[in-house]
């Protein structure tokens, strides 16, 4: 089979196409014939060498959709349409940037859907992150005012769509005026241009402060995001688009306003709410929730997909069609 492998950290071109054996079926695992896979920023970090636990060479790719080729000693019949996420895929064992991937049963979810492969392939990691952030991380509910910081990211746009479907008012940020329409198209009620300091602007629109903040830009803007929330409001750190993992200077007594709650969300396949995912897929099928796919690329174009992500060119999810 063909597979994209990382032999040593580097730029997008460090990913190279190889012909390697199809994994043998293994008890308790699903061998999946991959139809499409989403591209994720964590794969970009791994490719750059920022995931020290990942031993190279490795076929990257933490999610996919496809059909079960074989799944001995499991309840999955050959031909079943599935999605798979995380659980070490593309990190501890070879991942989904390939024509076949073998994944432990626990990280594989059967999904019946009329969606085409690239659309279904765009959803699992995005949904798991967004749903987990809104529920576990933020405890957000209908009627809440939600600020999505980093709104044009694929996670941000899906959050906007899901939060609107769940009855929230949504403010969303971008650094670029030109991307404001993408936020409105996703359903945002207000667009805030992110200069690094937006608390005054946000409070001009919501004077008491917002109920919930999804922080996707990260430590670079976290203090300012805390200043956007009302007492009793919640700020959830889910992303680090700003590429800074730690904060040099954090004084909790000064930087967390009285009564504001700071949480984080970092989910895995065990956090996948399958019933909610199936409902989400159905709503996408019905057109009730619209998902922004920035580009569907061919299997040969994985390097270009990584360049696209590195340059933060477009708003939405990058998906690779395998067949
Ligand atoms: N916690 C979890 O379980 C989990 C799971 C998946 C992803 N994530 C994280 O969620 C975040 C979003 O991921 P994604 O794949 O959706 O991202 P993405 O689609 O690649 O995001 C692209 C957007 O990021 C913004 N951006 C890029 N560099 C930035 C910077 N230095 N400062 C501020 N904004 C910047 C740009 O927005 P503008 O140009 O419009 O400002 C761009 O449109 C990432 O940090 C990712 O690691 C977390």
Image (cartoon, rainbow, N blue to C red):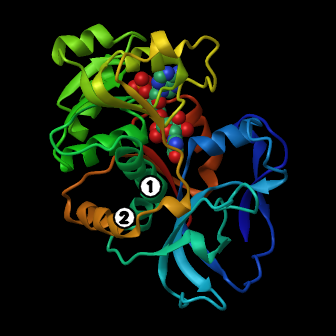
Label 1: which residue?
A: 128
Above or below: residue 176 compared with residue 82: above
Q: Position of residue 100 (x, y in %)?
A: 66, 72
Above or below: residue 60 compared with residue 275: above
> Residue visible at 72% across and 41% down?
47
Is disc 1 placed on a helix, strand or loop? helix
Q: Is residue 206 left or right of residue 33?
A: left
Q: Is mark 2 within 8 Å of ligand 1?
A: no
| Comes first in the chain, label 1 or label 2 | 1
Is 288 or 252 nearer to us in this picture?
A: 252
Q: Quadrant of residue 169?
A: top left
Q: Is mark 1 within 8 Å of ligand 1?
A: yes
Q: Is residue 252 left or right of residue 202?
A: right
Question: Within 10 Å of the Cα at label 2, are there few (<14), some (14-19), or many (20+) other Cα atoms?
Answer: some
Above or below: residue 172 compared with residue 87: above
Looking at the rendered structure, which numbered label has been put on residue 277?
2
């Amino acid at each position: 089979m063909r597979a994209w492998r990382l032999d040593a950290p580097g730029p997008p071109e460090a990913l190279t196409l190889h012909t390697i054996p199809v994994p043998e079926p293994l008890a308790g695992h699903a061998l999946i014939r991959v139809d499409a896979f989403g591209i994720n920023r964590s794969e970009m970090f791994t490719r750059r060498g920022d995931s020290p636990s990942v031993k190279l060479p490795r076929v990257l790719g933490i999610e996919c959709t496809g059909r079960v080729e074989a799944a001995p000693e499991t309840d999955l019949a050959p031909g079943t349409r599935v999605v798979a996420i995380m659980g070490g895929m593309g990190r501890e064992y070879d991942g989904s940037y390939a024509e076949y991937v073998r994944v432990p049963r626990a990280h594989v979810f059967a999904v019946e859907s009329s969606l085409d492969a690239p659309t279904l392939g765009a959803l699992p990691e995005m949904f798991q992150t967004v749903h987990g952030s809104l529920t576990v991380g933020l405890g957000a509910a209908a009627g809440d005012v939600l600020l999505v910081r980093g709104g044009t990211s694929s996670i941000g746009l899906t959050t906007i769509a899901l939060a609107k479907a769940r009855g929230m008012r949504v403010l969303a940020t971008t650094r670029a005026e030109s991307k404001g329409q993408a936020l409105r198209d996703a359903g945002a009620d207000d667009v805030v241009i992110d200069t690094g300091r937006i608390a005054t602007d946000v409070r001009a629109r919501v004077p008491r402060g917002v109920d919930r903040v999804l922080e996707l830009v990260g430590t670079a803007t976290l203090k300012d995001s805390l200043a956007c929330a009302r007492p009793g409001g919640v700020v959830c750190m889910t992303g680090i688009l700003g590429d800074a993992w730690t904060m040099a200077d954090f004084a909790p007594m000064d930087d967390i306003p009285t009564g504001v709650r700071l949480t984080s969300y970092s989910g895995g396949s065990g956090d996948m709410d399958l019933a909610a995912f199936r409902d989400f897929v159905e709503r996408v099928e019905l057109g009730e929730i619209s998902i922004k796919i920035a580009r569907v690329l061919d299997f040969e174009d994985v390097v270009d997909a990584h360049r696209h992500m590195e340059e933060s060119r477009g708003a939405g999810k990058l998906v690779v069609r395998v067949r």
